[in-house]
Amino acid sequence: MRFVVLALAALLLAAAVAFAQDPPPPVPAPPPAPTETPGPVVDTQPSVPPDFAAIGWHASRALGHPAARGRLVRGVQLPELGEDFFTWDPIHNVIPNREWRRWGTDRLVRTVLQVIHDFRLEHDDAQRVGIMDLSRPRGGRFGKNFGGLGHASHQNGLDADILYPRSDDTEQRPVKPSQVDRELAQELVDRFVAAGAVKVFVGPRLHLKGPRKIVVPLIHHDDHLHVRIR
Ligand SMILES: [Zn+2]
């Protein structure tokens, strides 16, 4: 009897040792990490125009009105050339425009360059867009004594004249309406309206469209549009 008990105890002990030596239950492997497969590039952020880098940005102030007692405080100068634009002297009809005719508020310069950059992203084969007069370095009157017909407005850094794209793709001022690419011109108008322009003056012979209070046909605008921001 004693032998049986001992044998049983030995058996139990062996079983216990065997149990203790059982390999631990396998730890379930972590699920495989999802592999990074590049999806289609979705452009959720507006892309920053490369031309911004050439500008000495600071906060500007527009005083008075575009066409009366206008002044520009701490204006920002538009460079003479960029990746997306060229400037055009409306008096001498050459690239670039003179440095004292290229000043605006930071918001105007930013808006004009962002609109032109977005437009060119959509049409990467398109010519660069021509920019003519903004305001003088400190604003003020910009009439006939500064050349040509002069401007009634452009006094406080909120106005810019933009050449319509030409249908022959050259970087020049269109001299007659038949040289204007009206489809691209309409797209530029639409983009300035969407960017918050308060006025876009357009050529009466081009039949460009937009909200009636904003897009207004005006004489002497068959070669360029005039955009005004708030
Ligand atoms: Zn103008």
Image: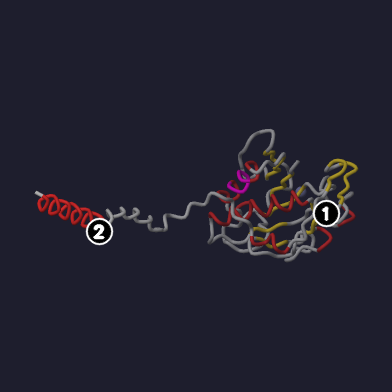
Mark 1 Cα-neighbour bin, 10 Å: few <14, some 14–19, many ≥20: many
Spot the residue most to the top.
213
Report if residue 164 lies within the magenta region: no
Residue 153 location (% of width, % of height): 82, 45
Q: Residue at x 82, y 55 (%)?
A: 148
* Marks 2 and 1 in Cβ contact (< 8 Å): no
Quadrant assignment for the C terminus: top right
Judged left or right of residue 113, residue 151 is: right
Q: Residue at x 38, y 56 (%)?
A: 33
Residue 62 location (% of width, % of height): 84, 45
Query: Image height check: is 6 above or below 93?
Result: above
User: For this rendering, which residue is in front, 8 or 180?
Assistant: 8
User: Amino acid under label 1?
Assistant: Gly
Judged left or right of residue 46, residue 17 is: left
Residue 172 location (% of width, % of height): 66, 62
Mark 2 Cα-neighbour bin, 10 Å: few <14, some 14–19, many ≥20: few
Q: Residue at x 53, y 61 (%)?
A: 125
Q: In this picture, which residue range is highlighted in magenta?
A: 187-191
Spot the residue most to the front.
2
Decide which of tag 2 and tag 1 comes sooner along the chain: 2
* Residue marked by disc 2: 21
Query: Image height check: is 151 above or below 93?
Result: above
User: For this rendering, which residue is in front, 131 or 180?
Assistant: 131
Q: Magenta span: helix, strand or loop, mainly? A: helix
* Residue marked by disc 1: 75
